Amino acid sequence: MNNRFLTMVAVGMILALGVGAASAYDLDDGTSLRSAMSRFDPAAQPSGNNGARLETLWIFDADYSDLIGDNAGWTTYDRSGTLASDNFWHHDTIRMTGFPHLGDSTWWCGTYNDCWRQPRGYGNDWLQIMERHFDEHIGVGGTSLTFEYDQRVAMENGWDYGYVDIFEAVADSWYTVVKVDNPGFAGTPGMSQDWDSTNEFAPGHMVVDISEYLGTEFDLRFRFESDIAFSSQDQYNNPPQNSVLDGAWQLDNITLYVDTTPVFYDDAESGDPWIHDDVVASGQTGVTFWRGQFGIDFVTGRDFTCDDRPVGSWMFAGVDPFTSQMVDNEAAWLMSPPIDISGAQKLVGYWDFWLDMPRETGDICNLELASDDQYHCVTSPDGFMDENPGWWYGDAGWRTRYDDWDAFTGNDWLATLWIEISDTPIGLHWAGILMNHQKVGIPSGDAGTVFEIDTWNRFNDWYVEQMPEALLDTMYIGVKDDDGIASVTLMASNDGGLNWSSYNCRHESEDSQWWYSPPPSAEMTLGSEIWMYFEALDGVGNTAIYPRDAPDHYLEMSILPITASVSNPGLLLVDKHGRVTPGAQRFRGGYPITRPLIQNHSEYYYVEMLEILGYEWDTYDVEVPSGSIKSEGPDTMAYKYYDTQIWFFNEFNAYLLWAVDQENLIAMRWA
């Protein structure tokens, strides 16, 4: 590699375009909540099949003016600091059939919850610890100290982990000696491992050499941690991977050996020699949503505008009552009472609220929902899920927004949860959310066939060396119609649209709007640019397509390299933005980006520049632009094909180049 490589990377940083990220979207981009806060994509609606919804019967109407009817039963939470949590390490008898060496029970870090999508397993945001003090090996002599145990692992690959930590009193620190999770390809939840696993990353029998602690007392703990999404709580099972089925971690036959002599043994039946206490809440800010009068109890903190709501209007605000501003490290939740939606075949949500979370403040918000036939499943914060992973920000202003909730019909109860948080202070905090009015209704009319592309599970570019992984990829697409959906088909071409192959998509479940698309395997050859679109057949024989003007516009993925080779290195564009440019928001196009590129997408300007200069290039579109672990650039295996790379992205400091990308680029510069 030469210096020109680093120069072009720097240019990519200087020319970085765009606002928004996969983990923080701008609510000021001209979209309604139905596109900004759900997976609904207005550009996906097929032309000529977009019937109007004429009227709405509002079945829930809360304006907070009193404390009766729909204004009663609103719940607020202070979720800042360290939250109180149950410790779920316990003896249990699940997942033992066929393994006589486990005896009558095992240790299980998991629980039962009939409100979750998988009614037994583990939840989001868990921190579960089981520990004890070890001194049984003191005075025994010997030359080695070994820790062994049997295990079963079902925890999301790359995000949720089980650790074995040892506390050394002399150093006054914990040290991790084992780290396990599901094995599998990066960006996928991986495959759970049973008691007889021989996988090197999560074997069924663990042998850990801890001889350095021979003759020294120490504490040892099993620690499990999960992130904010993808667990038994919010995911249906995904056979054959069974990624989190009955997860997260099971242990048995925990043994400490001095040489070959066991000095401690726990068979998970005889006694309970471990500490596994519940966590007590601590460090809360004390600021959460509270009901008050606008202009009297709190204000926006901004200059008066003609669309300000009347002074004295009752609202919920998550602000300090003395400053009318959010505070550092706040995490405020506002949860609706259960809403009876039994019998509804369509649903729409409505809000009127003040939002003041400029991106420079670092303050963000989110909407989560819970829906179930059981009343109690929509009254616990643990039952709520982010149906469109990501957080939101926006400049000061009053907003009236609608959201399409047809996906939640079929249950008896629904509830909403608004969340606002301030993380590490970046700038001055403002008033955040002032919730003025919230409604839920049943719309009339036919919206036709509507498509939704899951932001986090869609096809992206691959390199030929990754072909085995690419052929296991899938795309998650939602399709709904009042007449039902009979089938969904992926259409793919690698010859510029001259010939098209069809691939049948698999329905997630009978009552789900979601379908799994297989990869277009026949088109996935070296150097191929693959065009794709979807066809859906409804229950009465009508066909709709996504994108709505396909094949004139289409989705695209490539098997790289196309223009470059090892012997003749070329130019690579790495698109980590994948969105429209500032000032072009009102001309918003489809997301994911469709081809050919339209002028308001940031990639267009780089393409136009290179065409004018007479260059050829390859483009690598990351899986999820900007704001997740899935936004990593190409693996170093791809670097050999290029002597110049141009990366472009948004201006958020947190979502520019992930550490792994920085390390790869630096390593290749000096290779």
Image (cartoon, rainbow, N blue to C red):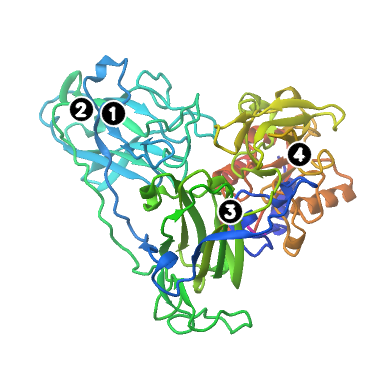
Helix, strand or loop at disc 2?
Answer: loop
* Left-right relation of 416 to 166: right
- Badge 3 density bin: few <14, some 14–19, many ≥20, Cα 10 Å: many
Residue 542's spot in the image, x, y percent? 75, 36
Q: Which mark is residue 608?
A: none
* Percent of width and height locating residue 420: 47, 63
Residue 294 at x, y percent in the picture: 48, 80
Mark 4 lies on residue? 545
Mark 1 Cα within 10 Å, few/some/many (few <14, many 20+)? many
Residue 524 in view: no
Three-letter amino acid code at the position of disc 3: Tyr
When asked about the image quadrant of residue 97, the answer is top left
Disc 2 crowd rating (10 Å Cα; few below 14, some 14-19, many 20+) is many
Q: Earlier in the sequence, mark 2 or mark 1?
A: 1
Label 2 amino acid?
Ala
Real-space Cα separation, disc 2 to disc 1, in angstroms: 8 Å
Q: Which residue is mark 3?
A: 655
What residue range appears in magenta?
19-24
In the rendering, at what x and y percent does residue 617 appear?
A: 80, 40
